[in-house]
Image (tube, coloured by chain):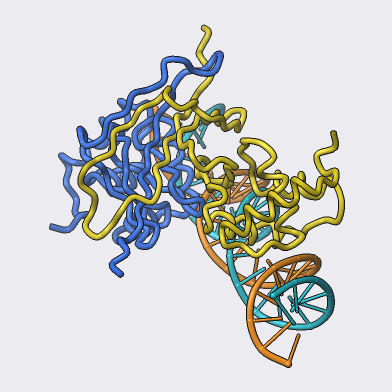
Chain colours: A yellow, B blue, C cyan, D orange
Amino acid sequence: MNEASYDPDQRRGVVRLLRSHGITPTAQRIKIATVLLARPQHLSADQVLALTNATGKPVSKATIYNTLALFTRHRLIQELTVDASRAFYDSTTHSHAHFYNPETQELSDIPDGQLEISLPDTLPEGTEIDRVEVVIHLRTTNNT
Amino acid sequence: MNEASYDPDQRRGVVRLLRSHGITPTAQRIKIATVLLARPQHLSADQVLALTNATGKPVSKATIYNTLALFTRHRLIQELTVDASRAFYDSTTHSHAHFYNPETQELSDIPDGQLEISLPDTLPEGTEIDRVEVVIHLRTTNNT
DNA sequence: CTGCTTGCAAAGGCTTTGCAGAACA
DNA sequence: TGTTCTGCAAAGCCTTTGCAAGCAG
């Protein structure tokens, strides 16, 4: 029930996942990855810090930031840039479209198939597509 | 030739534009708008500051930030969030898709028609679409 | 006059970095 | 034993804010 409870099978899975992405598993990285990848979610660095340190031995803020950057570099998670003031980290790497509500600061996935996009056939010279970020910014309906 | 040269006609146009967006024209706002709207471009606050203060009486950094926020609120320009570290301001409000090259920090428009997107027909309860941000993140091609 | 606007400097939030100690192979 | 990783605190960058003076209507 407790998210941080010790589950050897889960731990082994996370270790395998880190290794398969070329990341050396350490206690801190395993803990952070376990929190992040528990379910599809979008978390700010601060939220990751809070969740990670909700139980067990705390992980420092510097390590959180360094680890999130490392995970992003190795494509274990995806960094989202929807708000200039804060980065979000998406635990799912396949879905790329999101709703963002600035009022509630809520970020949510748009289900696959709900949105279609056709990419341009010509790109700037010498470049290729790294990733596509689609964010639909919402506002509360004006019920006058 | 000089971008900041005094052109009464241009100035009148900018004043009209500000008024039509519900913005009280002041010397600083006119100067900033003139720089920004000179052509389609994507500028950071710092770049706007530099360009604005390249000639004439300088405008303070605080006013630049406040004015860019004001212009954005009144939909004269559009704020783009492609890089967590810096906001960009787009002088064109109709085109929404961009290429972004993190290595060069270059932001460029994708011509209309090059990219098509079908929006979802269902939105979260009580919300409507404010704007859609599509950013194709590029990377330099690996010429091994 | 009265309210909005500007500018300066200080504060603020998020993120990165330097460096010493700890962990790991 | 040599390299990588962690954590603390300090620094850094971009942006916002408080407040007094200036300007516009």
Report the front residue among B95 and B68: B95
Name the side, left or right, on which A26 lies relative to A133.
right
Query: With A81 as the anchor, is A65 left or right in this view?
Result: right
One can see residue B12 in this view: no
Residue at point 40%, 28% (across, down): B131
Give above or below for C4 relative to A69.
above
The correct choice, above or below, for B57 with respect to A114 in the image is below
The residue depicted at 62 percent of the width and 35 percent of the height is A40
Task: Give how far across and how far down residue A96 sits, in percent.
Answer: 46, 37
Q: Position of residue A28 (x, y in %)?
A: 75, 59
Horizontally, residue A59 falls left or right of residue B17, namely right
Of the pair B53 and A55, the residue shown nearer to us:
A55
The image position of residue A52, as x and y in percent, is 77, 48
Q: Position of residue B52 (x, y in %)?
A: 33, 55
The C terminus of chain B sits in image quarter:
bottom left
- The N terminus of chain B appears in which quarter of the rendering? bottom left
